[in-house]
Amino acid sequence: QEAVQATRYPSLGGIRGVMSLARMNNYGAQNPHYYKEAAGQICNIMQIETVEAVENIEAIAQMDGVDALFVGPSDLSASMGYIGQPQHPEVKATIEKAFARIVATGKAAGFLTANKDDAKWALKCGCAFVAVGSDMQ
């Protein structure tokens, strides 16, 4: 809930700071309604990277303002006791089940991988978006 609140302005359910002369508002010059319209233009994607987050997929997805859930395999594998092993069969099974649960909530499921085969696998499992690579690739 706090992650969503950080993207909303006060009086609109949030805690985000207000600065009228900032770049996101074109320095106040062109959109006097920015603060009231901003929430509708933001996509909030929650990262599912721990066993606890997996256990709470449905609760996270039902929060107002959450648009999608993104599974991070490296951190999740570490949380499961398989650090450095995102390909471990138990990790992959957990991720696949997580995708199905996310999709069942009506939210978009996402994934990050370093290779095309995993990207194809994630898409077959129901992911709506997949990032391939990193800043180092």
Image (tube, rainbow, N blue to C red):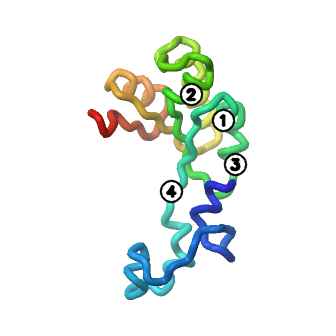
Question: In percent of the image, x 69 and y 54: which residue is there?
Answer: 1
Q: What is the x, y in percent for residue 129?
A: 43, 40
Of callouts 1 and 3, the N-terminal one:
1
Q: Are marks 2 and 1 in contact (CB under 8 Å)?
A: yes
Q: Report the residue at 39% width, 83% height from top.
A: 27
Mark 1 — residue? 53
The amino acid type of the residue labelled 1 equals Ala
Q: For label 3, count other residues whose C-alpha is less than 10 Å away and answer few (under 14), some (14-19) or many (20+).
A: few
Crowding around mark 4 (Cα neighbors within 10 Å: few <14, some 14 to 19, many 20+) is few
Q: Residue furthest top?
A: 89
Mark 2 — residue? 76
The amino acid marked with disc number 3 is Gln
Label 3 to label 4: alpha-carbon separation: 15 Å
In this rendering, position of residue 5 left or right of residue 43: right
Against 28, residue 5 (above or below) is above
Q: Nearer the viewer, mark 2 or mark 4?
A: 2
Q: Which residue is mark 3?
A: 62
| Rendered view: 67 above or below 84 | below
